[in-house]
Amino acid sequence: MKFLKSIKFPIINLRFFSKTQYSLGIQINKESAKIAYLESTSKGFKLPIVPFQINLPENEEEAGNIIKEELEKRNIKPTKVVSGLSSSSVLFKTLKLPKVSKEELIDAIEYNIKEELNTLKGLASYDFDIIGEEKDFFEILVVIGKMKDIERINTILKYASIKTNIIDADPLALINMALLYQEKTEKEENICIVHFEEKESYLTFYHKNVIIQSLNFSKENYEQLSPDDKEIAVENLINEINYFFLTIHEPENIYLSGYAFKFPEIKEYMQLKFGRRFNLEYLDPVEILNIDYNGSTPLGIYNVPLGLAYRGFLE
């Protein structure tokens, strides 16, 4: 398919660590960027600087120059950079295809993602990974991204004098964090993450496939509400989650991420309403990445850029 452009998306992978010592994760949204810088240690990871957020103008050159200035202020000279596509910029699809040659496999994948490409309406880029196999079949996870959003990130980072080593997807960065946590705690295979952002909040569900459900919740709106209206907002959020699991096997645990760390009442009220149906846990990067951190800012707000930076340590 000539309208497809090649780009490498990393897929979920926890098997091999690289020799990289530092990794920079950059989450770029329409109006801001969240940045995290990780250093690998023998016991886990540490933060040479505390993750930070900067507002970005619409102009790509100006946005890149601002990022460049902020990195220079902090004396950050990254050798490994991982940037992320937002949840609204990517689609995921799992395929079960016969074991054939690589060329035949690519043809079969492109045939099977025609509908998703039409959904994105425009130039798209995709990558795939084999996440399982049977005797005669491969289970394949395909990640499809909007080319205009990929190009925007690359252009901004070019003006920031940064070369991106990996373009990831924000939901995959969160899944990798959850997988690492489950590897340590031997939790169930199903992963459900409710991630809260300034404007674009979403639920991510993973079990051999990745499903993203946008949520009608924004940090900016929530902060302006009265206590009674906040309770209504969380009630509506619970209803959205209930609706999502009408047709999907329920997990035992739901991980809360992003601005859930800033508003603890959300977790408390949701747990009260869910009772024993779900166990709600914070997706806590301090525990997951074994970070030595005593700051006042909850690091969970920066789970996406931290997950992106963590991805830089994986082969």
Image (cartoon, helix red, strand yellow):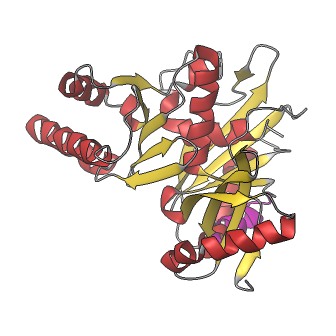
Q: Residue 279 appears at what percent x and percent y?
A: 35, 22
Please provide percent x and percent y for residue 60: 62, 71
Magenta-highlighted stretch: main secondary structure? helix
In the rendered image, the quadrant that contains the C terminus is top right
Residue 255, x across and y down, in percent: 43, 30
From the viewer's perspective, tell me whether residue 157 is left or right of residue 21.
left
Q: Residue at x 20, y 44 (%)?
A: 239
Specify the segment rendered in magenta: 151-162
Residue at (23%, 39%) from the top-left corner? 238
Q: Is residue 4 left or right of residue 298?
A: right
Q: How many marks?
A: 0
Do we see residue 298 in this rendering? yes
Res 28 quadrant in image: bottom right
Q: Is residue 138 above or below residue 19?
A: below
Q: Residue furthest left?
A: 228
Quadrant containing the N terminus is bottom right
Residue drawn at (54%, 72%), measured in percent from left and top?
Answer: 116
Residue 168: percent from left, percent from top: 67, 52
Quarter occupied by residue 68: bottom right
Residue projecting furthest to the front: 135
Question: What residue sits 79% from the left and 35% below the top?
Answer: 313
Q: Nearer the viewer, residue 82 or 277?
A: 277
Q: Where is 113 relative to 207, above or below?
A: below
Quadrant hosting residue 122: bottom right
Residue lying farthest to the bottom in this orientation? 2
- Residue 186 lies left or right of residue 280; in this view the side is right
Tell whether 131 sits left or right of 163: left
Magenta stretch: residue 115 in it?
A: no
Give the vertical position of 14 relative to 7 (above or below): above
The answer to whether one can see residue 6 in this image is no
